[in-house]
Amino acid sequence: MQFFPISQLSLLGVGDPGIPNRERIIMRPTEEINLGEYFMILGYIENDKSITPIPNNLFYFGNVLVAPPSWVTLYTGPGRDIESRLKHSKEHVHVFHWNRNHTAFVDPNVVPLLLRIDSLSYTVPVLSVGKPSQGNLTFQA
């Protein structure tokens, strides 16, 4: 499977890999974007250089508008999401926390994968099966 590269949000790398409370993924937007269209997941680089997503490792940024010149930083550990400015350049910094219990990038084959959503399907949960009752969805055979 092949994917197109994401040009609107540059994935610059991982800072302080394997160091608790400092490990972070560093990104910069190249144009104004809504981070709600993006997810971060973890992947594993296989021997053949393909990358396999690691199950149950997804971060959703939420609906946050970012524009250059700014930074987006995702710490893998616990913390509070904030927006701030760099002292020397006054550029915006959007800081997010994945709230993981442990670091993610101890193994150099584990890498961050940035995904952009362009399609979506969903269904509503089935609340009861059988005799219809008011307010519940049911299956009809």
Image (cartoon, rainbow, N blue to C red):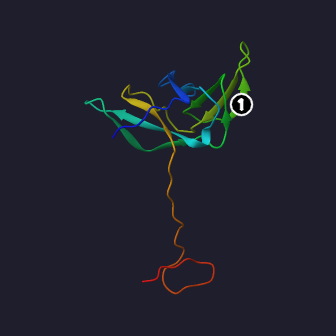
Task: Give the x, y percent position of residue 139.
Answer: 47, 79
At a point 52% along the width and 38% down the height, the residue shown is 101
Q: Is residue 81 visible?
A: no
Task: Give the x, y percent position of residue 91.
Answer: 70, 20
Give the image quarter of residue 66: top right
SS for tag 1? strand
Left or right, residue 56 beside residue 71: left
Q: Is residue 134 visible?
A: yes
At a point 29% along the width and 29% down the height, the residue shown is 49
Task: Give the x, y percent position of residue 111.
Answer: 42, 30
Task: Give the x, y percent position of residue 64.
Answer: 67, 39
Check the picture and name the quadrant holding the C terminus. bottom left
Give the residue at the far left of this rendering. Answer: 48
Give the image quarter of residue 84: top right
- Amino acid carrying mark 1 in the image: Glu
Give the residue at the far bottom of this rendering. Answer: 131
Most foreground residue, 92 or 43: 92
Most foreground residue, 40 or 119: 119
Check the picture and name the quadrant holding the N terminus. top left
Left or right, residue 97 beside residue 128: right
At a point 57% along the width and 28% down the height, the residue shown is 21
At a point 74% along the width and 18% down the height, the residue shown is 90
Q: Which residue is mark 1?
A: 83
- Figure disc tally: 1
